[in-house]
Amino acid sequence: MRKADSIKPAAIKPGDILPLSPVVFSILLALAASEKHGYAIMKEAALPEGGGVIMGPGTLYGSLDRMMRSGLVEETGITDNERRRYYRITTFGSEVFRAEAARLARVVGAVRRKAVLEGVR
Amino acid sequence: MERLPPPMLWLYRGALVVYPLRLRFKYREQMLQTLRDAYRDRNVGAIHFWFRIYKDLAQSSFTERFNMMRDFVFKAPIAFHTAALALVLTLLGGAVAITMQQMLRRGANQPQIDMAQWYAGEIGAGEAPGNVIPPGYVDLERSLQPFVIFYDEQGNPGPGTGYLEQRIPVPPPGVFDFVRIHGSENVTWQPRSGVRIASVVRRINSKTPGFILAGRSLRLVEEQESLLWRIVMGGWVAVMVLLLAGASLLNRAQRVKPSVA
């Protein structure tokens, strides 16, 4: 969230706004597979495989707002009702997400190589 | 799982007042729906759940406000620097003005301190108050001249040169009580509405115990203070106008694109 806050996607490359905060990465991860409404994002982010990021509505919608302004996600325009709007990842958001995932994979690879964590395969 | 009790929903809706207005306006209904869903599916106790929700609201409100301020600084640096400069100048000007006012006010005590010390010394050395204090008549309401008054141990007026409506006025008994303990006191004394006196009271311990009060009308000093604050306020307004005009010109100059030849 830090670097992505006020930067127009057209002016930057995905790698320029890395690293992402855990909240932003978890939201992108949740939206990577399919569009979701707020609570579904929050629920998936809280799962261990979703990043284990526990957040409330305040953090979620504040983050979504900044991510929309940064061009990482957008509203689909589809709603169950006014209270439940759906969000999806943008093309730029996907690029950023992949770049961050690759960066994290390299970090995890380095951890494995250095055997910092016992039992990590 | 159970539904969210309406009072708790109203409470959270009310607490959203701490959330930034723009976000609240845009996302409130979604936030409330997310809260309903989260409460329905919660896998922790109610207390734990609400603690987590309100902690998140407090943290995110602070974070979002901070981010908005940071965005403002980046997007409008001239406005930010102008506001910061205005604040610094206001604080600096305020500090200088208060220092000058204090100097004026303390200066108002200066002849009285010397007078009270001298008269207290003379009476303390054994002179009778009537012999030391010269005859005179200073109208406290009109005159700007300093005056001196002797009061006995009980606070009754003795010889003196200060008069109000042709009588020697007496300060509140609390002043004498204080001076009995502490030896002296500088006090702004208002014997009547509209008459304010910068007075210095000293204790006299001698064969004629009592108190000596030296005073002077604060009218001149208060007029000077009033003039000082008018000058300060006028100067402040002028500086702020200049600052705003400068910032506006700078902002306009930055927006004008250079022409392409």
Image (tube, coloured by chain):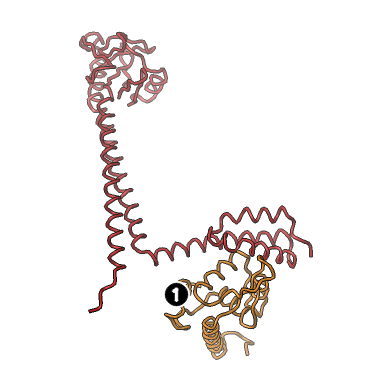
Chain shown orange: that is: A
Of the 4 image quadrants, the one containing the N terminus of chain B is bottom right
- Camera-side residue of B132 and B207: B132
- Camera-side residue of B212 and A100: A100
Task: Classify residue B192 as left or right of residue B45.
Answer: left
Task: Classify residue B215 as left or right of residue A18.
Answer: left
Q: Chain of mark 1?
A: A
The quadrant holding residue B157 is top left
Percent coordinates x, y for residue A6 in the rendering: 45, 71
Percent coordinates x, y for residue A104 in the rendering: 54, 84
Task: Classify residue A99 as left or right of residue B75.
Answer: right
Disc 1: CA contacts within 10 A as few (<14), some (14-19) or many (>=20): some
Task: Classify residue B106 as left or right of residue A53.
Answer: left
Percent coordinates x, y for residue A33 in the rendering: 64, 83
The quadrant holding residue B154 is top left
Against B3, residue B195 (above or below) is above
Chain shown red: that is: B
Instruction: Identify the residue shown where x is 36% and y is 10%.
Output: B156
Of the 4 image quadrants, the one containing the C terminus of chain B is bottom left
Instruction: Identify the residue shown where x is 69% and y is 70%.
Output: A80
Kindly identify which residue carries mark 1: A7
**In the image, what residue type sits under mark 1?**
Ile
Against A114, residue B221 (above or below) is above
